Amino acid sequence: MQKKIIIAILLTVVIVSGSLGIISNIAVRETIDNALQHRLELSLVVARNIDLLLSNSLKRLYDISLAGTIDLTDRDWGPEGRALKKAFDYSIFSDGLFIIDKSGTVVYNYPHQPLDHINLLALPYAHVVMAEDRPFISDIFTLEPTKRKIIYILVPLKNKYGLIVGAVGAEIDPSAQNFNEIIQSVHTDTKVYMEVVDSHGVVIASNDAKRMFKDQLGGHSNFLRNLIAAKKAVITKCHRCHAATDAPSTKATRSVDIMAYAPLENASWGVSIVQPEKDILTPIARMKRSFLLVSIGFIGIALVLTIALSRRIVKPVHDLIDATVKIAEGDMTRAIAFGGTDEIGKLGSSFEVMRLKLADSLEELKKSNAELEAKVEERTVQIDNHRKRIKELLQKVITTQEEERKRIAREFHDVIMQDLVATLLKVDLCSKHPESVTPAKIEGIKAIIEKNIEDVSLIIKNLRPLMLDDLGFVASVRWLAEFHLESKGISCYVNIDNAVNDLALDPQAEIQLFRIMQEAIINISRHAAPKNVFILIGVNHERLNIEIEDDGCGFDTESLEVSGDSTRGLGILGMKERASFLNWDLKICSEPGKGTRIGIKAPLASEFDHV
């Protein structure tokens, strides 16, 4: 019991602690998930704002063509200069705008400066500007030999006839304040980097100036390129390699970051919010350590208290068990002495009172048991004698009844029918000498006598059907159906299992079974007025099963009672008594207007034997 108490309390503490730990862990993880979702939403908002900024800048460049004054062949750069100045003012084009012809050569720029530009159409994907009439925003590009970082924006340049005559472009310095103000305006935690990266993973804008123009993923550009190509906002893990120092021999360390990424629509760039995974998981680790220490403390305290409490409870209980064992062995002389006012003390006192009363009760019980056993034995003998007597009397009554019917049947057959046959012979002789009797009279006498013979034969069959002895039970059942049902126009369907033909029925059981079926069929013929009757006889699970069902008028089985001045229900009562005498199961189910079903189950082991 002490072990059970300790285990139960410790198990309770462990379950409660585990449940609280799981709940706390779930709550922390939900908080982290919400924080990550917030970062993803924030990256989407920043991406939309940068997209809006780029969209407005592209519109400024498209407005140059819409001015309708562009003509690169007249060598008059006044209209072009005014259009470029208008687009330059209050824009992010910090390093100016320029116009290139179809060959990619810069023919004019604003503000005016030395034309040291490269052939911009040689940039990857830049040819789509004039080939496909689409704008182009480049990745970070490094100008040689100054190593200046620049971003190019190009849109098709059309003349007043709508024909592409070149391209108008702009240079953006990614380190300029007006380009980075969207990123820098968003407040983030320490070690959380919000950055705009190009398709190669190079940081274009960042809230940390030290990370500008660096490879965000430490050379894993394919990973970022796939995200940009998918154009789908995600939260994912990424790996970076960091050098501990600037020394070439220093080994690089590998870290895992959580990145919320949102792509841009107008450029092959993306906005990412990156934070080291260990910083995100630190609350969970800290919570697990704290919870583990607290749980160990609680379990230790619970263990100490449990051992002390169990000893205080278990020892008196063991003493009480020893005392009750003595009582169970019949030793009522040993007193149970317990003090104290707690539950154990009260229980000991109650056991002592019980012991005293039990000792007195045992003495009285022994005397009463002796007297009761004598009376029970006497009553048992009387009941057995009465049962045997009743069974013998009932058997004699049934046997006498059947013997009397046999005697009457034999007397009808041997005496009355013989006399009638002799009379018939005399009538036949008279028919040969019709001096005193006319042939018509003789024929009338003959018809009457033949009818008497038929009636007497019917009486004999009802009293004791000879075919039950001659042809057996199955043939007798078919005769009952034909004579009482089919002869009156009632359709009768008799289905008897072949296994029934192989049964050797006990004569007494066979008679009782026949009488039950005879009573049932006669009742159907007289009272049910059915159209169809079904009789099924089969063998199943060492039982002879008989079912008789009709679609007649039916009756209320509960209201069927037998009174002293009425014979209503005597036939059904006789059926039940015969079945009860042989321990058969007889059920009668009927409702007014729904027909009647009679079921009989007779165990083969007790009443019948297989051939």
Image: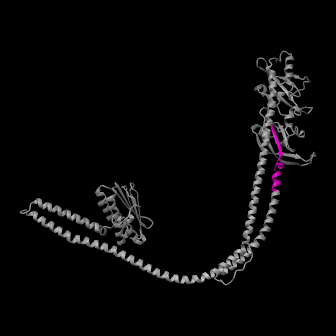
Residue 3: x and y in percent read 73, 70
Answer left or right for 570 relative to 80. left
Q: Position of residue 116 (x, y in %)?
A: 90, 26
- Drawn side of residue 80 relative to residue 358, left or right: right
Q: Is residue 246 above or below residue 541?
A: above
Q: Name the image quarter holding the C terminus.
A: bottom left
* 459 displayed left or right of 152: left
Image coordinates of residue 331 in percent, x first then y, are: 65, 83
Q: Main secondary structure of the magenta part?
A: helix
Which part of the image, by quadrant, shows the N terminus?
bottom right
119 displayed left or right of 162: right
Determine if the magenta segment contains residue 283. yes
- Residue 606, visible in the rendered structure: yes
State the residue at coordinates (25%, 71%): 408
What residue do we see at 77% from left, 70% from top? 309
Q: In which quadrant of the rendered view does residue 338 lie?
A: bottom right
Q: Nearest the camera: 468 or 68?
A: 468
Based on the displayed image, in which of its 4 quarters is residue 388 positioned?
bottom left
Residue under the point 30% across and 55% down: 489
Residue 539's place in the image compared with 230, above or below, is: below
In the depicted structure, whether residue 206 falls above or below residue 133: below
Colour treatment of the image = one colour
Q: How many marks?
A: 0
The magenta span reads: 270-288
